[in-house]
Image: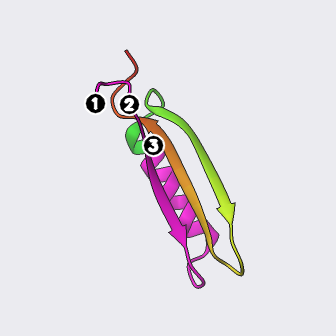
Amino acid sequence: MDGNSVCYKVFRAWGVTPWEDLFDEVAAFASEIGPYRLIGISHSAGEGDSGAATVWYWREPVK
């Protein structure tokens, strides 16, 4: 893969995990990879308190 490959990381919340904890994890990861690699963040809600958030990012800084 070259430096312009798109990657993602999925974070999940189940039942007892508060949404705030899920989004804190997502924000920490997005901050770690930095603004030049971050493409975007998406989220979805399932039944009950389940949900997921995905961080989309470039493998390396865009060239």
Who's the residue at 45% across and 43% down the image?
31
Front residue of 23/52: it is 52
As drawn, 40 above or below 52: above
Residues under labels 1 and 2: Cα distance?
Answer: 6 Å
Indicate which disc residue 1 carries: 1
Q: Amino acid at mark 1?
A: Met
Q: Along the horizontal axis of the image, is 49 left or right of 22?
A: right
Q: Residue at x 37, y 14 (%)?
A: 63
Compute the Cα span from label 1 to label 3. Answer: 23 Å
Q: Secondary structure at mark 1?
A: loop
Tell me if label 1 and label 2 are in contact, CB under 8 Å: yes
**Foreground residue, 17 or 57?**
57
| Residue linked to disc 3 | 31
Mark 2–mark 3 Cα distance, whole angstroms, equals 19 Å
Element carrying mark 3: helix
Residue at mark 2: 5
Residue 6 in percent (x, y) is at 43, 35
Which stretch did the figure color magenta? 1-30
Q: What residue is drawn where x is 64% and y is 56%?
A: 43
Residue 57 within the magenta-colored segment of the rendering = no
Magenta includes 18? yes
From the top left corner, tell me how far across and down residue 23 is, in percent: 57, 60
Label 1 crowd (10 A; few <14 / some 14-19 / many >=20): few
Q: On screen, 26 above or below 38?
A: below
What amino acid type should be assigned to the residue bearing mark 2? Ser
Q: Secondary structure at mark 2?
A: loop
Q: Quadrant of residue 32?
A: top left
Viewer-nearest of discs 1 and 3:
1
Question: Does residue 19 lie above or below 59 as drawn?
Answer: below
